[in-house]
Amino acid sequence: MKRSTKMAISITAFFVAWETVSRSGIVNPALFPPPSNVFRALVEMARSGELVRDIEASLWRAIAGFVIGSLAGILVGLLTGRLPSLDAYISPILQMFRPLPPVAIIPLIIVWFGIGEVSKVFAIAFAVFFPAWVNSDLGARRVPRYFLWSARTLGCRFPNVIWQVVLPSSLPFIVGGLRVGISMAFVMVFVSELSGASSGIGYQISISYLAYRVDRMMAALAVLGLLGLVCDFVLVRTLQWALPWIRLDAAAA
Amino acid sequence: MGVALDPVGRGCRMNHPDAMIEVRNLNVRFGSREVLRDVSFSVDKGEFVAIVGRSGCGKSTMLNALANFIDRKGYIRIPDNIGFIFQSYAVFPWLTVEGNIRFGMRSQKGPFDSAKMGSLLQMTELADVAAKYPAELSGGQVQRVAVARALARSPEVLLMDEPFGALDAYTREKMQGWLLKLCEDNKHTIVFVTHSIEEAILLSERILVMTQGRILKTVQIPFTRPRAKAIQYEPEFVELTREISNLLEENSSE
């Protein structure tokens, strides 16, 4: 049996079981609505225009925070990974912040930046920064010395060696960091929109909770999960297209 | 014809006017371990010198010291513009064959020299795979990319650290033939490290025999160029191989 067939069977069985349990009377359908009701709530949100508005708002925040956090993380990681003196100055401070759950700093961010877009994007960028930094730092430390020596004999010196050798050589690690980062971005989108937002998937979940509309909460959660999945898929496919050598190298290893 | 084992024993031909590389009293330590001890030798312009010795005798360290990759003490005179070819594939996996060669040409001033690119691809027999990534190539092709990339900078000296060591016997033989032809067509100054005595005799004009961080003997190769691979079966070649092998055996610490 093909993998896709197995997946289709498993997903169908999941929804059928859910629908059956919800309608059987074993559980309260208001608390545990069947998927058909969740789907109806989704259609309702789409028709009213809320869905597009919320997706747009969340996606924009996630992408902005992801791009800023990733770029900063990659840049700092490459430098701390290759420059021991800079590493000695910067890494202890970053390591102090790294164990903090990104969610815990949201109140502080709101105090500093208010409840506007800046605080949301900052919170997301903060969360994305650390996996990007850790993986880039690790990748930069693992650059084979033969690459660096070759670059040197070919006349490539600092800072060019960072962009032309250390960065591409670290990409397999960086890609891993970016994939963790994109998941973090969607966690933070949800959390940052729970308060002080007037649009976004997190906001939708929050107001549905206040209205006791579990079907809408589930619909919004499904959209958030799907958005994360689609973004990860797009990221992976884009990277595969832009960096074909990573796949070729892994296959040849 | 007798075998010319140089009695000087240290490869020294100091203050030679044609010397492209001059090394005097080179010492390298890794922690408390003395890896190279008072090594002195010179290499003439256009000369192909091979360094042979057992694993751990300091051959690769010698090349790394020449290229200034590691800390060392002593006097080394070598041109700035060197090409280095490693045993492990040090070509960049994120660049295509052409991209790797282009990387080698990047430091040259002026517009991109497409004629030079074409001639390097031709010379290294890589024109058909110019757009491929290293992961799509055979081991022999990858090493030819490394050679083409090193030559792209028109180096005055080529340092080759067991470049065919990771190849299978068939590919290794093909690459030796290819390098022989390359040396005959273009008179490069080459220092070539290998653990294969046959390879050293076949390719070089002079062999520095190393053991325990020292140059034990210098062996002048009596075969003229152009050389065919068939010389390996000549009695003189076999005799020379045996003599160097015995020399290493007698001076082995194991």
Image (cartoon, rainbow, N blue to C red):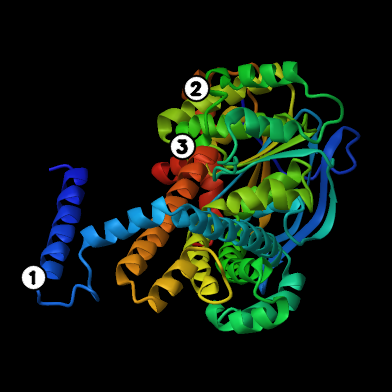
Which residue bears the numbered disc 3? B167
Amino acid found under the numbered disc labelled 1: Ser
The residue at the point 73 percent across, 29 percent down is: B152
**What percent of the width, then of the height, locates residue B232?**
50, 25
Labels 2 and 3 share a subunit:
yes
Question: Residue A98 has which mark?
Answer: none
**What percent of the width, then of the height, locates residue A236?**
46, 48
What separation in Å lies between label 2 and label 3 (alpha carbons)?
Answer: 25 Å
Which residue bears the numbered disc 2? B234
- Vertical placement of B203 versus B71: above or below? above
At label 3, counting other C-alpha atoms closer than 10 Å, the crowd grade (few under 14, some 14-19, many 20 or more) is some
Decide if residue B241 is in sight here. no
The residue at the point 55 percent across, 67 percent down is: A131
Describe the element under mark 2 as helix, strand or loop. loop
The residue at the point 55 percent across, 50 percent down is: B248
Q: Nearer the viewer, mark 3 or mark 1?
A: 1
Q: Which image quadrant: the N terminus of chain A? A: top left
Labels 1 and 2 share a subunit:
no
Query: Image check: A137 left or right of A14?
Result: right
The residue at the point 56 percent across, 68 percent down is: A198
Label 2 is found on which chain of the structure? B
Amino acid found under the numbered disc labelled 3: Leu
Q: Nearer the viewer, mark 1 or mark 2?
A: 1
Callout count: 3
**What percent of the width, then of the height, locates residue B243?**
54, 40
Question: Residue A24 has which mark?
Answer: 1
